[in-house]
């Protein structure tokens, strides 16, 4: 039971780290798109 709990915690931490990395990449990508859109609007006017 204790070993299963430890393994479960390790897996959850690993998945959480992957989730954070993916979220950071998505947020960075979104941020770049927003900046690009702002620059395009600025150049248009």
Image: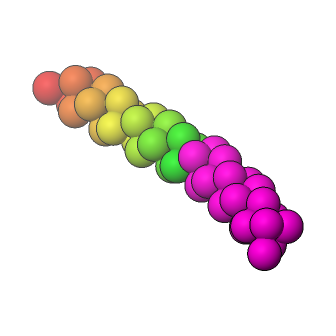
Q: Is residue 38 above or below residue 30?
A: above
Q: Position of residue 32 (x, y in %)?
A: 45, 35
Q: Position of residue 23 (x, y in %)?
A: 52, 49
Look at the image and tell me in which quarter the N terminus lies.
bottom right
Which of the 4 quarters of the picture holds residue 39?
top left
Side of 31 relative to 28 (left or right) = left
Q: Is residue 39 above or below residue 3?
A: above
Residue drawn at (45%, 43%) of the image: 27
Q: Position of residue 37 (x, y in %)?
A: 31, 38
Look at the image and tell me in which quarter the C terminus lies.
top left
How many numbered callouts? Answer: 0
Which of the 4 quarters of the picture holds residue 3?
bottom right
Which residue is situated farthest in the right direction here?
A: 3
Residue drawn at (79%, 66%) of the image: 2
Q: Is residue 15 magenta?
A: yes
Q: 28 or 44, which is in the foreground?
A: 28
Residue 18 visible in this rendered orientation of the protein: no
Side of 26 relative to 34 (left or right) = right
Residue drawn at (36%, 30%) of the image: 35
Q: Position of residue 24 (x, y in %)?
A: 54, 41
Q: 2 or 24, which is in the foreground?
A: 2
Residue 8 visible in this rendered orientation of the protein: yes
Q: Main secondary structure of the magenta part?
A: helix
What segment carries the magenta color? 1-22
Which residue is situated farthest in the front direction here?
A: 1
């Amino acid at each position: 039971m204790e070993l299963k709990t430890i393994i479960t915690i390790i897996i959850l931490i690993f998945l959480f780290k992957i989730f954070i990395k993916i979220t950071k990449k998505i947020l960075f990508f979104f941020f770049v798109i927003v900046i690009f859109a702002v620059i395009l609007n600025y150049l248009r006017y």
